Image (cartoon, grey):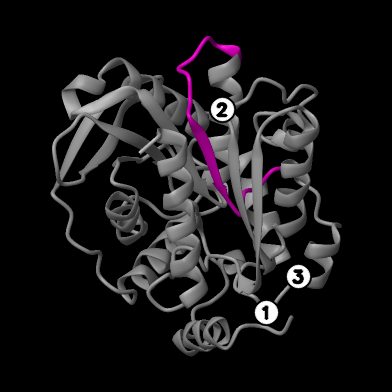
Amino acid sequence: MALDPQAQRVLDQLAALNNPPYTELSPEEARRVAVEAARQMAPGEPVAEVAGRRIAGPGGEIPIRVYQPGGAGPHPVVVYFHGGGWVICDLDTHDMLMRRIVNAAGAIVVGVDYRLAPEHKFPAGLEDCYAATRWVADHADSIGADGRRIAVAGDSAGGNLAAAVSLLARDRGGPPLALQLLVYPITDRDFETPSYRDNAAGYLLSREVMIWFWNHYIRRDEEAADPLASPLLAGDLSLLPPAHIITAEYDPLRDEGEAYARRLATSGVPVTLRRYDGMIHDFFRRFAMIDQGAAAVAEAAEALKRAFGT
């Protein structure tokens, strides 16, 4: 279908900022641009409590942010990995999204400030995300969480990390996960899919920026074939947690997210796939400006509640 008018309005607003493309910036400059752009978005809604913590990780302390819902616990918990191509964004750029998920799903959300590339290349950020997920399971009581009801979630590169954490949890003996919520996830480094060709430029996330992200994330081309970098290439996807996958029509990542859903289904993993027609990459985080973004967040919250049995 045609590009949604609200999505077009977002594209027009971003174009009016006249920021240079990330490909012309250093990672540090790109992070500043991303943070400044996030400040133009609506402020996050109130939640019962927000607390920052630092936990032990494989490369030093990992900052996390724990968002609490109201009501009596223990609550189920969502470990959330922000997007940004493994290079940009942080807990602040995704604060409003994590707050919305807390209130919509009635769950604790633990945001993970994993190490970013290129200073910390693959698999450093992934190992931080897995360590944080294990910490949540092992220390659930300390945050009022139910360690038997844990989901992992993320958008874009965060969706990639959530899928890879699910693989690690299966292969390293836990923790058990109730759901992997993957929002337009990166699952492969293939820049020649139809969605990459059709949406190469003009729809917020471009093919050239994705090449820039991948070049910062991995040290050499061979690493892109590692299933923990490209989950779509995993030989065995059986025995993974149920998945809820959201994609956008005008997104270079559309086809690889949908291909991953098909692979999971043929491997016997319960999976729900939902494509939002007329939508662009990042519409999920822009729920305050795009009605379909709000609908997608509500859908994700319902999927989490079903997985948690709440």
SS of the residue under disc 2: helix
**Residue 112 found in image quarter:** top left
Q: Which mark is residue 166?
A: 2
Residue 245, placed above or below residue 131: below
**Residue 198 found in image quarter:** bottom right
Residue 306, visible in the rendered structure: yes
SS of the residue under disc 3: loop
Q: Which residues are magenta?
A: 171-187
Residue behind mark 3:
200
x%, y% of residue 262? 78, 42
x%, y% of residue 274? 64, 57
Residue 150, placed above or below residue 200: above
* Foreground label between 3 and 2: 2
Give the amino acid type for the residue marked by disc 2 in the picture. Ser
SS of the residue under disc 1: loop
Q: Nearer the viewer, residue 80 or 33?
A: 80
Q: Is the residue under label 1 in contact with that under label 3 (CB below 8 Å)?
A: yes
Residue 229 left/right relative to 282 = right
Give the amino acid type for the residue marked by disc 1 in the picture. Gly
x%, y% of residue 206? 68, 68
Give the amino acid type for the residue marked by disc 3 in the picture. Ala
- Mark 1 Cα-neighbour bin, 10 Å: few <14, some 14–19, many ≥20: some
N-term-proximal mark, 3 vs 2: 2
Residue at x 72%, y 31% (from the top left corner): 223
> How far, Cα to Cα, is label 1 from label 2?
32 Å
- Mark 2 Cα-neighbour bin, 10 Å: few <14, some 14–19, many ≥20: many
Residue at x 43%, y 56% (from the top left corner): 28
Q: Which mark is residue 202?
A: 1
N-term-proximal mark, 1 vs 2: 2
> How far, Cα to Cα, is label 3 from label 2?
29 Å
Residue 16 left/right relative to 262 = left
